[in-house]
C-alpha cells in the first residue's frame, strides 16, 4: 500500500511535468504539496485540461478544478492526521481517489501499456551477452514475435557470429519503405554491481532497469509492439544483428549487400536520446557521397522533424536537431548500418534513452515516460513515409 | 475465558481464519466506542477541522493502546492473547500493533484482495490479526471477505493498493463474506487473502484490530523497510522486538 504512495507521487509528477512542460529532471522528486498547488491553480488546471484534450480524454472524465481541490485537500488532511496521531484514510483511500481522478484518464497516454512491458520483461530476461546462454532462445523469440506481426524472417547464420535476422513485411496500405536497424545482443556487465537483477526488468523511480534496456532492447520492444498493431504501414525491412557489442564482424560482411539492394524513404537507427530536461535530441541527416558524411536534413526530412516536434509538444517537451549519427564507435570499423548507408539516404535516430541510461554500465535504464513518446512518433514516421513516397 | 474448539482450530488451519465470540460484552463494546468518540473529537481539533469533515476523510488509526486506557486494556485482554497463542501454536505472543478501522457510511471504498504479511517487517509469517467488531458487521456494511485456504499458497509480493485487481479464476466463487456481530472477532492468519467492499449502509462499521505475533519473531526491516512500526524498533535486525513498544500480550494456556 505504501509502495503505491511512491507510484502516486511519480504519476502526479509526470502529469504536472507533461501538462506544464516542466524540466524532466524533476520527475519523481516533486512533493505532493507542490503537485497539489500546481494542478489546482487556475493555470495549472487549464494546462491539465488541455493535456487531457490533446490525448483525447473525453471532457466528462476530466475532473473540475473544484473536484481536484477537494481530493487534494482530503489527502492533505489525511497526511496531517498521520503526522499528528497516526490516522489516515483507510488503506490510502484518498490516494486511490487521486489516482483515479488525476492519473487514470491519462495513464494509457503517458505510460507504456501492459503488453509493451510484458514484451520488455521477456526480452530483457534473455542473457544475450557475448557467449550468453540466452542468444538462441532470444533469436527464436524475436522470430516468433516478428512472424506473429506479419514479417517474413530470414535468419542468416554466419559461422563466426550470432544470427542476423532479416525481417520483411509488405506494405499495409501505405507507400514507401522504411529500413529499421537494431541488435539483440547485450554488452558484458558486472552483475554484482546492479541494484536489481540485470535480467529482470525492474520499474523504479520512473525508470525501467535491465541489462540492454537502453542498448537497445526497450526501443526494439516498443517498435515490435507498435508495428504489430499498425493496421496501415509502409513496407518494412528490419535488420537485427547479434554481435554489435563485439565488433559486428558478420554484420560488416552481410549488411552492405542488403543495404545496396534496397532503397528506403528513411533509414531508422536502433535508438535515440532525450536530454536531461526531456528535450528530444533528434539525429537527422542526409548522407553525402563519402560513406558517413553528415549533410543537413533535406526538405522532406525537415517536414518529418516538424511532425516529431509536434508529438514532443503533446508530451510537454521540446526538441532539437543534430546532423550526425548516433555515437557508437566502440570499434574501429564503426557501425555496419551507418557505414553502409547509400548516398542521399535519410537517416533518423529517435528513441527512448536519456543521459542517465548508463549504456554499457551497471544499472542500465530508460525513463518510462519516453516509451509512449517513441510509440507515437513511430506512427508519425510511417504516415510521413507514405506522404513523402507519394510526393504529397 | 474463551475455549477454542477443535473445529475452530481446524477451520483456522484449513481456511486461514475463524470466527470467535463473543469476546467482549456489550458494555465493553460501548466503552471502546465511547473511547473512540472521545479520541475523534480530540483528533479533529488537532487537525483544525470539524468532526464531520475529519470523519469523512480519516478512517484508520494505529497505536490506540498508547492513546487511550480503554484500548490499552483491550490489547491486554487475556482471552485475545490466549486465542492467538492457541491458533499460532506459540508459547507467548507479542503485540505488533493495534489499529482501528472505521468504514464510514457513503465515503468508503473497496479494499482489494491482499495479504498482510508482505507489508510487515517480521522475519517469519507467524502472526495473526484479531479483528473485533465494534458494530454489527453485515454483508452490506463492508464485511471482510476471505478466500478460504489461500494462505496455503504462501507469501505473494505486496499488493499495490492503487492497481490491485487480483483474479482468482475458478476459485472466484469460493470467496466468503464473514458477518460478525459486535463484540465478536475474526482471527485471521497473516498470509490469509482478504478484501472488503464499501459500506453501503448509513451506519458506521468500526473494528479494533490487534496484531499478535509469535514472541519468537524477529525484526526484519528488509522484509518491509517502510513500515511505520520500524520507527519504534530499538533492537538490531534478527533480534526479538523490544517489549516496551511491542508488549508481551499473553501466554499459552491449557485448552
Image (cartoon, grey):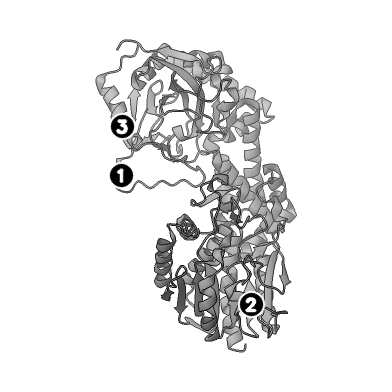
* Residue at (48% x, 23% y) in the render: B218
Q: Which residue is mark 2?
A: A347
Q: Which residue is mark 3?
A: B15
Marks 3, 2: nearer the viewer: 2
Q: Residue furthest left?
A: B7
Q: Is residue A92 left or right of residue B214?
A: right
* Residue at (65% x, 43% y) in the render: A72
Residue B171: assigned label? 1
Within the image, what quadrant is residue A375 found in?
bottom right
Q: Position of residue A179 (x, y in %)?
A: 54, 78
- Which of the chains bears the disc numbered 3? B
* Residue at (55% x, 38% y) in the render: A2
Instruction: Compare marks 3 and 1 and give the one earlier in the sequence.
Output: 3
Element under label 2? Answer: strand
Q: Position of residue A24 (x, y in %)?
A: 69, 55
- Which of the chains bears the disc numbered 1? B
Residue B96: assigned label? none
Q: Position of residue A304 (x, y in %)?
A: 65, 77
Q: Above or below — where is A185 with respect to B12?
A: below
The answer to whether residue A4 is visible is yes
Q: Is residue B180 left or right of residue A130?
A: left
Element under label 3? Answer: helix
Mark 3, other Cα within 10 Å: few <14 / some 14–19 / many ≥20: many
Q: Are marks 3 and 2 on the same chain?
A: no
Q: Nearer the viewer, residue B161 or A160?
A: A160
Within the image, what quadrant is residue B86 found in?
top left
Q: Are marks 3 and 1 on the same chain?
A: yes
The residues tagged by marks 3 and 2 sit, at their Cα atoms, a distance apart of 63 Å
Q: Position of residue A327 (x, y in %)?
A: 66, 67
Amino acid at each position: 500500500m505504501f509502495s503505491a504512495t511512491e507510484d502516486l507521487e511519480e504519476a502526479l509528477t509526470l502529469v504536472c511535468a507533461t501538462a506544464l512542460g516542466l524540466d524532466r529532471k524533476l520527475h519523481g522528486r516533486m512533493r505532493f504539496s507542490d503537485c497539489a498547488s500546481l494542478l489546482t491553480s487556475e493555470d495549472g488546471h487549464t494546462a491539465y485540461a488541455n493535456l487531457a484534450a490533446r490525448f483525447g480524454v473525453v471532457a466528462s472524465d476530466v475532473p473540475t478544478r473544484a473536484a481536484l481541490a477537494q481530493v487534494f485537500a482530503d489527502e492533505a488532511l489525511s497526511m496531517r492526521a498521520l503526522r499528528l496521531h497516526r490516522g489516515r484514510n483507510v488503506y490510502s483511500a484518498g490516494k486511490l481517489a487521486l489516482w483515479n481522478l488525476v492519473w487514470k484518464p491519462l495513464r494509457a497516454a503517458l505510460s507504456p501499456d501492459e503488453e509493451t512491458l510484458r514484451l520488455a520483461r521477456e526480452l530483457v530476461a534473455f542473457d544475450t551477452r557475448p557467449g550468453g546462454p540466452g542468444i538462441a532462445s532470444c533469436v527464436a523469440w524475436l522470430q516468433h514475435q516478428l512472424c506473429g506481426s506479419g514479417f517474413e524472417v530470414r535468419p542468416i547464420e554466419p559461422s563466426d557470429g550470432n544470427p542476423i535476422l532479416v525481417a520483411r513485411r509488405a506494405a499495409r496500405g501505405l507507400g514507401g519503405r522504411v529500413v529499421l536497424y537494431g541488435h539483440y545482443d547485450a554488452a558484458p556487465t558486472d552483475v554484482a554491481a546492479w541494484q536489481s537483477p540485470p535480467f529482470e526488468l525492474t520499474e523504479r523511480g520512473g525508470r525501467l532497469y535491465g541489462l540492454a534496456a537502453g542498448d537497445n532492447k526497450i526501443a526494439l520492444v516498443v517498435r515490435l509492439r507498435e508495428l504489430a498493431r499498425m493496421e496501415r504501414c509502409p513496407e518494412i525491412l528490419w535488420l537485427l544483428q547479434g554481435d554489435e557489442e563485439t565488433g559486428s564482424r558478420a554484420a560488416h560482411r552481410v549488411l552492405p549487400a542488403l543495404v545496396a539492394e534496397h532503397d528506403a524513404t528513411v533509414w531508422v537507427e536502433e535508438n535515440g536520446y532525450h536530454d536531461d530536461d526531456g528535450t528530444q535530441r533528434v539525429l537527422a541527416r542526409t548522407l553525402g557521397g563519402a560513406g558517413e558524411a553528415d549533410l543537413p536534413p533535406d526538405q522532406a526530412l525537415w517536414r518529418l522533424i516538424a511532425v516529431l516536434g509536434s508529438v514532443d509538444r503533446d508530451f510537454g517537451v521540446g526538441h532539437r536537431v543534430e546532423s550526425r549519427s548516433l555515437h557508437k564507435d566502440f570499434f574501429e570499423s564503426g557501425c555496419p548500418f551507418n557505414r553502409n548507408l547509400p548516398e542521399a539516404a535519410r537517416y533518423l535516430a529517435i528513441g527512448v534513452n536519456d543521459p542517465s541510461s548508463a549504456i554499457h554500465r551497471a544499472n542500465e535504464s530508460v525513463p518510462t515516460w519516453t516509451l509512449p513518446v517513441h510509440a507515437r512518433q513511430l506512427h508519425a514516421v510511417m504516415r510521413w513515409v507514405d506522404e513523402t513516397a507519394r510526393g504529397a | 475465558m474463551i475455549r477454542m474448539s477443535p473445529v475452530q482450530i481446524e477451520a483456522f488451519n484449513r481456511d486461514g481464519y475463524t470466527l470467535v465470540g463473543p469476546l467482549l460484552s456489550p458494555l465493553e463494546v460501548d466503552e471502546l466506542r465511547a473511547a473512540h468518540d472521545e479520541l475523534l473529537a480530540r483528533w479533529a481539533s488537532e487537525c483544525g477541522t470539524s468532526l464531520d469533515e475529519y470523519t469523512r476523510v480519516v478512517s484508520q488509526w494505529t497505536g490506540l493502546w498508547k492513546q487511550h486506557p480503554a484500548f490499552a486494556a483491550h490489547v491486554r485482554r487475556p482471552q485475545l492473547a490466549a486465542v492467538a497463542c492457541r491458533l499460532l501454536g506459540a508459547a507467548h505472543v507479542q503485540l505488533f500493533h493495534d489499529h482501528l478501522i472505521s468504514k464510514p457510511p457513503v465515503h468508503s471504498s473497496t479494499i482489494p484482495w491482499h495479504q498482510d504479511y508482505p507489508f510487515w517487517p517480521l522475519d517469519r509469517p507467524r502472526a495473526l490479526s484479531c479483528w473485533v467488531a465494534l458494530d454489527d458487521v453485515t454483508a452490506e456494511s463492508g464485511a471482510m471477505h476471505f478466500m478460504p485456504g489461500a494462505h496455503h499458497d504462501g507469501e505473494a509480493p505486496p499488493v499495490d493498493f492503487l492497481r490491485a485487481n487480483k483474479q482468482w479464476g475458478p476459485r472466484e466463487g469460493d470467496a466468503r463474506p464473514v458477518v460478525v456481530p459486535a463484540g465478536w472477532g475474526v482471527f485471521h492468519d497473516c498470509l490469509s487473502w482478504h478484501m472488503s467492499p464499501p459500506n453501503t449502509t448509513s451506519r458506521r462499521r468500526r473494528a479494533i484490530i490487534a496484531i499478535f505475533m509469535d514472541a519468537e519473531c524477529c525484526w526484519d526491516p528488509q522484509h518491509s523497510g517502510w513500515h511505520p512500526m520500524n520507527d519504534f524498533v530499538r533492537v538490531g535486525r534478527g533480534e526479538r522486538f523490544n517489549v516496551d513498544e511491542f508488549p508481551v500480550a499473553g501466554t499459552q494456556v491449557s485448552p
